Each structure stands twice: as structure tokens, then as C-alpha cells.
Image: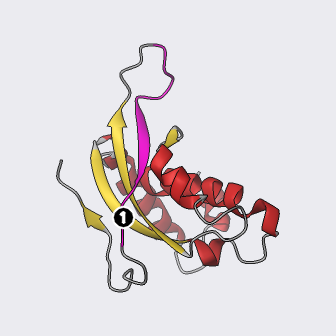
Amino acid sequence: WCTRDFFLWPRVFSSAQACVAMAKGAGKIKRSEDVVTREYTIHLKKLLHGIGFKKRAPRAVKEVKAFAKKMMGTDDVRVDTKLNKFLWSQGIKAVPGRVRVRLARKRNDDEEATDKLYTLCTHVVVERHQYKGLQTVNVDE
């Protein structure tokens, strides 16, 4: 299957390199199975550019969920009420430009749940105009 799928890969790989890369990735440990907590800064102004006024706050919530899904690798993403209130704090059209969030990948204790893990998004309070220099941080619980 390497030669057939090779054409879907970027041209920088040879077919032999593509086969080796596929074989190496097969035995990797899935890091998305671990329970972990990290803090991120999300630049909402960039994500909401060009969005109509009456759709900005609802879109901001969706963008935070999409960011958490991408970073943590879980389909089940839950937004905390305080984060939701912060996103809506200036009304529907004046969403804050940046938001600092704590993403916690947790085990799902619910018996009939389809996913083993879920992500909880909570708000980290940052003083206004103090986002500069903040990095992504692993948080020990």
C-alpha cells in the first residue's frame, strides 16, 4: 500500500522513506490516553475576524471547543460556566481578544459513555493586557 498512498504524501519523501515512516508510527504509544492538564492562551480576535456581530460570542464558544478538541484529542469537550460567562461578559459582539484557558483531559466515570476521556475547559484569570509572554504550561494537579 505504500506505493499507492505515496502519491497522497508531499513530494519530499521517497517511497522507501514513506514506508519506513508508516512502519515507525505503527508502534507508537498513544499519548492521548494520559490524563493531563495544560494552560493555553487562545487568540480569539484572530479566530473571529470577519464574523458578523450577532454571531461572535456563540462562535467564540465553538472556537474554544474546537481548540480543546484539537489540542487534547478528545471528542467530548465541556466548557465551564465561568469561561462561558467570560466569553459573553462584554456582550454578543465585543468578545475579549484573548482568553487563557486550562484544558484538563479527564477520565469519564460515566458507565454508558462512548468515550473514555473528556476535556474540561476552565477560565484562568489574567489581568487585562498581561497576556504577553505567557507560554503553554503543563499544570500539576
Picture coordinates of residue 130, whole percent (x, y): 36, 82
SS state under label 1: loop
- Is residue 28 placed above or below 135 in the rendered structure? above
Q: How many marks are shown on the rendered structure?
A: 1
Examine the structure image and report whether residue 42 is included in the region drawn in magenta. no
Examine the structure image and report whether residue 123 is included in the region drawn in magenta. yes
Q: Which residues are magenta?
A: 112-126
Q: Amino acid at mark 1?
A: Val
- Is residue 80 placed above or below 130 in the rendered structure? above
Residue linked to disc 1: 125
Colour scheme employed for the rendering of this structure:
secondary structure
Picture coordinates of residue 14, whole percent (x, y): 52, 74
Q: Is residue 32 left or right of residue 5?
A: left
Q: What residue is at 36 percent from the left and 61 percent from the top?
A: 124
Q: What residue is at 70 percent from the left and 58 percent from the top?
A: 59
Q: What residue is at 61 percent from the left and 54 percent from the top?
A: 61
| Residue 99 in view in this figure | yes
| Residue 27 in view in this figure | no
Along the viewing direction, whichever of 84 and 137 lies nearer the viewer: 84
Along the viewing direction, whichever of 30 and 50 lies nearer the viewer: 50
Please identify the quarter of the rendering in which residue 12 is found: bottom right
Along the viewing direction, whichever of 133 and 30 lies nearer the viewer: 133
